[in-house]
Image (cartoon, helix red, strand yellow):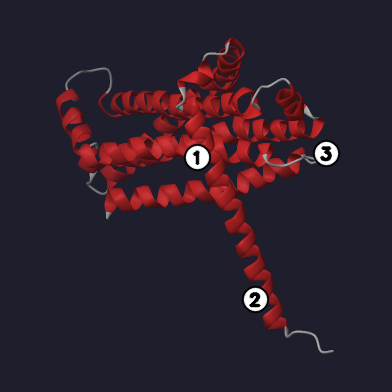
Amino acid sequence: MTSAPLGQRSLDVASLALLRWAIHARQTVLFGASLVVLALSPSNYRSLAMRHALARHAWLDTAPILAGFTLLSALLTVVLTRIVVVTARSYGLSQYALEMVVRVLVLELIPLTAALFVALRCTIPNGAALAELRRSGRFEELRRQGRDPLVHEVLPRMLAGAFSTVTLAALSCVVATVLAYFAVYGATVAGLPAYTRMFGHVFNPSVALIFTAKTIFFSLAVSIIPVSAGARTTAAPGSREGAALQGLVRMFAVLLLLEAASLMGNYY
């Protein structure tokens, strides 16, 4: 019996990998849709234990990283604004410098950085923790008690991750907007009319809508994909890193697609 040609075997491996990726993507979409439905159902918030779990996860996923990320965004704003302004002045394009800073920093970098920051610090570890809970029998224990593990363990972590992403992005964008003004005009209100006109020109209705939608979809991606990978996988001992890595790869691919779609909407 002759073996299959090398090219045919490579094609079969690629087809199998693509099929496996499509199956995982379909499962993630369906699981995420079920979580969104659960999140929009008021009856799931009547339980005192659910509300306590949601408040605890929201606090743990937001408060410890809020100050650090805001300071990082402030430092990035000051450095990037200074570089762009000095470079633009040397080419006689100083009137476009501040608009460039707002477009690059506020529109693109901060929402994406906030999503990645929350994912690495909160949602990917939460997904690995869910895989460990599933392996240890916590989900089956909740089912025996008549409680849905999706509502009591998965949903609070998903909502907390989305809340943390939106909070970090919103606060950091406000801080970056204020610091960019002071970096260019200083402690004076003389440049406020020009800055307001420029900001309104950048954030026209279509761009503002795309920015809001992108931030929301970023928050859903970084909160749903890692917890989906953890909640649907029975983790063996020591496999928490594997679950975290799988969630990171899938989530990063989705974030890139969302960022590419927003760039096309803003500039094409």
Q: Residue reaching furthest bottom?
A: 2
- Between 148 and 161, the one lying in front of the other is 148
| Left or right of 161 on screen, residue 78 | left
Mark 3 packing: few (<14 Cα in 10 Å), some, or many (20+)?
few
Label 2 close to label 1 by CB (< 8 Å): no
Looking at the image, can residue 64 be seen? Answer: yes
Q: Mark 1 points at which residue?
A: 33
Picture residue at 71% right of the left edge, 26% below the top = 143
Q: Is mark 3 on a helix, strand or loop?
A: loop
Q: Is residue 171 above or below residue 247?
A: above
Nearer to us of marks 2 and 1 is: 1
User: Which amino acid does the dot numbered 3 rest on?
Assistant: Gly
List x then y, in percent, for residue 58. Answer: 55, 19
Mark 2 packing: few (<14 Cα in 10 Å), some, or many (20+)?
few
Real-space CA distance between mark 2 and mark 3, rounded to the nearest whole angstrom: 33 Å
List x then y, in percent, for residue 6. Answer: 72, 82
Q: Mark 2 points at which residue?
A: 11
User: Which amino acid does the dot numbered 1 rest on?
Assistant: Ala
Q: Residue reaching furthest top?
A: 48
Q: What element carries label 2?
A: helix
In the rendered image, which quarter is residue 14 located in? bottom right
Image mark for residue 238: 3
Looking at the image, can residue 97 be seen? Answer: no
